[in-house]
């Protein structure tokens, strides 16, 4: 579909929201103390790495739902 309509994914998302089929995700975070970060084997803020779940378990913080489309105003 993307080859036929380059904005297909965006249109599909907007249509789903308009129809009440709200996409949603369960949100989790991992936390680390300053001391743990100082002793970590690599830079804990390196986005190419994943913190081990055994050492830093996922903590559920809520649910993220797209239940409306953004209101945009075009410049005149």
Image: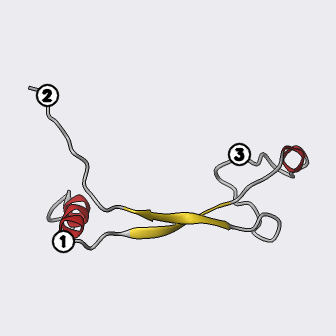
Circle 1 is placed at which residue position?
Answer: 19
Element carrying mark 3: loop
Quarter of the C terminus within the rendering: top left
Quarter of the N terminus within the rendering: bottom left
Mark 1 or 3, closer to the camera? 1
Name the residue rendered at 35%, 61% in the picture: 66
| Distance of label 2 from label 1 (alpha carbons) | 28 Å
Circle 2 is placed at which residue position?
Answer: 75
Note whether residue 2 is visible: no
Please determine whether, in this image, residue 40 is positioned above or below residue 72. Answer: below
Task: Give the image quarter of residue 52.
Answer: bottom right
Circle 3 is placed at which residue position?
Answer: 45
Q: Earlier in the sequence, mark 2 or mark 3?
A: 3
| Distance of label 1 from label 3 (alpha carbons) | 39 Å
Q: Label 1 crowding class (10 Å Cα cut-off): few <14, some 14-19, many 20+?
A: few
Element carrying mark 2: loop
Q: Where residue 22 sits in the image (x, y, percent)?
A: 31, 69
3 or 37: nearer the eye? 37
| Distance of label 2 from label 3 (alpha carbons) | 39 Å
Q: Label 3 crowding class (10 Å Cα cut-off): few <14, some 14-19, many 20+?
A: few
Name the residue rendered at 23%, 71% in the picture: 20
Name the residue rendered at 83%, 66% in the picture: 55
Q: Earlier in the sequence, mark 2 or mark 1?
A: 1
Q: Label 2 crowding class (10 Å Cα cut-off): few <14, some 14-19, many 20+?
A: few
Q: Earlier in the sequence, mark 1 or mark 3?
A: 1
Point out the residue furthest to the top here: 76
- Left or right side of 52 for 16: left
- Left or right side of 25 for 38: right
Disc 2 to disc 1: CB gap under 8 Å: no
Mark 2 or 1, closer to the camera? 1
């Amino acid at each position: 579909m993307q080859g036929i309509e380059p904005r297909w994914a965006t249109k599909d998302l907007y249509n789903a929201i308009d129809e009440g089929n709200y996409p949603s995700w369960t949100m989790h975070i991992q936390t680390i103390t300053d001391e743990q970060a100082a002793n970590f084997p690599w830079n804990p803020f390196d986005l190419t790495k994943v913190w081990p779940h055994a050492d830093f378990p996922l903590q559920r913080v809520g649910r993220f739902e797209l239940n409306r489309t953004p209101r945009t105003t075009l410049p005149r």
